[in-house]
Amino acid sequence: MSTLNYSKQRQAILDLLQSRKDHPNAEVIYQTLRKSMPNLSAGTVYRNLKLLTELGQIKKLTGLDGVDHFDGTISPHSHFICQCCGKVDDVFFEADESLNEKAASHCDGEIQSHNVYFYGTCNECLKTIK
Amino acid sequence: MSTLNYSKQRQAILDLLQSRKDHPNAEVIYQTLRKSMPNLSAGTVYRNLKLLTELGQIKKLTGLDGVDHFDGTISPHSHFICQCCGKVDDVFFEADESLNEKAASHCDGEIQSHNVYFYGTCNECLKTIK
DNA sequence: AAAAAATTAATAATCATTCCTGTTTTTTAT
DNA sequence: ATAAAAAACAGGAATGATTATTAATTTTTT
């Protein structure tokens, strides 16, 4: 895969993800950055999101609304998805190391990592419903 | 959404999923069933997988290899994905109820359910590597 | 058994993502 | 600092999983 060179497009994508607490998808990232980089191309966004994910500098979130979302926070954490509004929040909750150990005996293999997704209704949506 | 009528196509899809321990994707389901139902159409497979998922009779697994996979086992369990061969195993491991409770205080909302994915290398792949 | 409703097959359309090509930027080596 | 080599880019075409459309068939209701 060789080493990654510098590019201002890649830097901008990483900066954007690290500065946001939400978890934008490729299209949102593209439209946002296009304002300041008018001839950024969508392919560049997709290619760099893939590269950064492979290098572990960002995390890809799947299974939310059908399209991939991206997270610039790489410290271990889970996600809470509101099934009402689709919002994805970080959940900083550390059951982490123990979870792999507990599951190990039930697995036909060696666990290296895990992802946890919580589904529910966020407080904002709960207010609206009542 | 009205009520679901009977259709032998839908029944065949559900039977197939409940009889298999792996987690086939739509294409595999389509090709398998086509052997005994030669004019089954792919659209029918996709439409019924979507319906059955919405009704909670099957579970959709995302984020494995880019395409959705389906699981006929609805009792609560997790999944182990081998990053080497792509195999997806069930993990019947019950930290379940407690996990929602533990995470609740870290969430801005009400947790209703969760999904856990474990990633690693299966025993078969471990052998091959060594 | 006929009418109404639901489902299907076949195929066209969609849309997120990847691939391709010629150009530009970044790095390396002089 | 400059030229050659490597990596990355923009723009657009291609891919591929999934969804939508429509006329025909099957299932349910009466």
Image: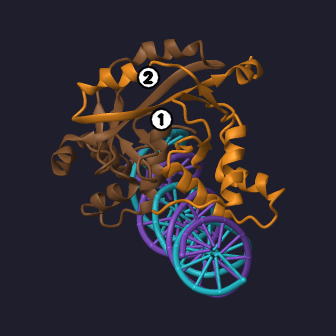
Chain colours: A brown, B orange, C cyan, D purple
C-alpha gap between disc 1 and disc 2: 31 Å
Q: In the rendered structure, which amino acid carries the disc numbered 2?
A: Asp
Taking B106 as reference, is D21 above or below it? below
**Left or right: A41, with B14 as reference point:** left
**Left or right: B3, with B122 as reference point:** left
Q: Nearer the viewer, residue B61 or C29?
A: B61
**Chain under disc 1:** A
Task: Report the residue at 77% width, 54% height from top.
Answer: B33
Residue A4 seen in render: no
Q: Nearer the viewer, residue B82 or B38?
A: B38
Taking D21 as reference, is A58 above or below it? above
Q: In the rendered structure, which amino acid carries the disc numbered 1?
A: Leu
Q: Nearer the viewer, residue B36 or B84?
A: B36
Quadrant showing the C terminus of chain B: top right
Taking A9 as reference, is A121 above or below it? above
**Left or right: A13, with A128 as reference point:** right
Residue B105's image quarter?
top left
Residue under label 2: B96
* Residue C18: x %, y % from top left: 58, 55
* Residue C26: x %, y % from top left: 41, 47
Q: Which label number is shown at residue A55?
A: 1
Q: Are marks 1 and 2 on the same chain?
A: no
Sort mark 1 into few (<14), some (14-19) or many (20+) by Cα contacts within 10 Å: few
